[in-house]
Amino acid sequence: MSVSKSASPRLIAHLDMDAFFASVEQLDRPELQGKPVIVGGDSDRGVVSAASYEARNYGVRSAMPAVTARRICPQGVFLKGRMSRYKEISENIMTILRDYSPLVEQLSIDEAFLDLSGSERLLGPVREVCRTIKQRILTEQGLTASIGLAPNKFLAKIASDWEKPDGFTVILGDRVPEFVRQLPVEKISGVGTRTQTVLKAIGIKTAGDVAKLPLEFWERKLGKKGIDLFYKCLGRDDSPVRTKRRRKSCGAENTFPQDLISVATLKNRLLMQSERVGRDLRRLHSKGRTVSLKIKYNDFQTLTRSCTLDSPTDTTQVIFRTACRLLEGIHLQKPVRLTGVSVSNFEKQPVQLRLFPDQEHLKQEKLDRIMDVIRDRFGEKSLRRGDSE
């Protein structure tokens, strides 16, 4: 990994909205202010998507089973969530960021990197720019955000989480070496449970401990991950802020209100999920070759099956029929709690047209386009495809 040789130091900000989904619900319903709001846990079989800081005080966390959240926070306000509303506000926030730099890398619906390198002559002190961004989001959107400012993406992301909520942490100049030296290794991106086990076995607790050993040691111990770890523990990360992130897959999955055992009923659910995946692919103007099926039993055992097609597709019926074939290849041993369908392995090159196109395939493509137009105009629930294969 080379060190950046730019004339001016890099100035990278990472913005992370505070308890975004829950905060939006509290914004739109003032009576929820100060209450433990839990989004995504509206049924005992669901999973928590977001929890307000009031709910976090009880130990509620995202990805926690709703039944656990209800047990530890019985007074919580459990909501289904409104993704269209969250996306609307997210787009407004990203527009604010782009007022200060064309280099904005959106990581998710509620976080993004912002490259402010070399902007001081035009915008003024970067610290003040970050404070202005936080104030605009509060004034225009009614929400708080936390920002980390650092010389690279690795440190900026850590900094944004340092003083949440409504935080602003700056790690620049002389502060970088001391901050990194004391950083616990579990805070470093890419250090998962398995790597933590390896590090713990050799007595490594902080980034400073990692930096005491030579690069060659870490390369032998962890391969490429070891090289990345070593440089991050020196506070170095030259990865650029990318304005466009290429999606690698499209997927849809659902946890059912009740466990299912009927294959016919499961196929009906797969059809609805295939509809969502196909529609997302067409919106992205992408086609994929690999269709995957995910099955989770009522005891949480999970199975995945995949099939790679001869030609890439964004056609709902092709996705659905492939998912059905994968389902038929599984001997269902227990009631099913969840199914999911996804398409990956996107085609990078233009697809070669067939000399004699499949008329049924053309018919399905035309049907997809018509249904997309109707749903764009009248809403997602305005039209539903029959459940036959």
Image (tube, grey):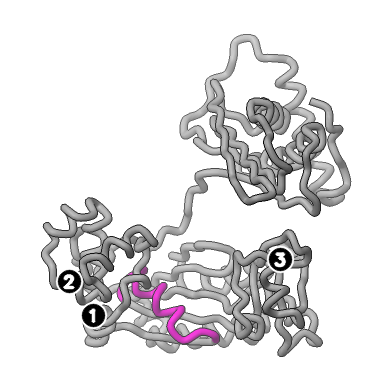
Q: Residue at x 64, y 71 (%)?
A: 50
Residue 173: x percent and y percent? 25, 84
* Kind of residue at badge 2: Ala
Whether residue 286 appears in this view of the structure is: no
Whether residue 266 appears in magenta in the rendering, the answer is no
For disc 2, the marked residue is 211
Relative to residue 299, is residue 26 drawn left or right? right
Relative to residue 117, is residue 226 drawn left or right? left
Work out which quarter of the rendered image holds the C terminus and state it: top right
Q: Residue at x 58, y 40 (%)?
A: 303
The reply to whether the C-beta atoms of the residues labelled 2 and 3 are less than 8 Å apart is: no
Residue 295: x percent and y percent? 64, 41
Q: Spatial distance from mark 2 to mark 1, Cα to Cα?
A: 8 Å
Q: Spatial distance from mark 2 to mark 3, Cα to Cα?
A: 41 Å
Residue 246: x percent and y percent? 48, 48
Q: Which residues are magenta?
A: 151-165
Q: Earlier in the sequence, mark 2 or mark 1?
A: 1
Q: Residue at x 38, y 75 (%)?
A: 156
For disc 3, the marked residue is 40
User: In which image quadrant can residue 323 be found?
Assistant: top right
* Kind of residue at badge 3: Gly
Comparing 283 with 235, the one in front is 235
* Kind of residue at badge 1: Arg
Whether residue 198 appears in this view of the structure is: yes
For disc 1, the marked residue is 181
User: In which image quadrant can residue 30 be found?
Assistant: bottom right
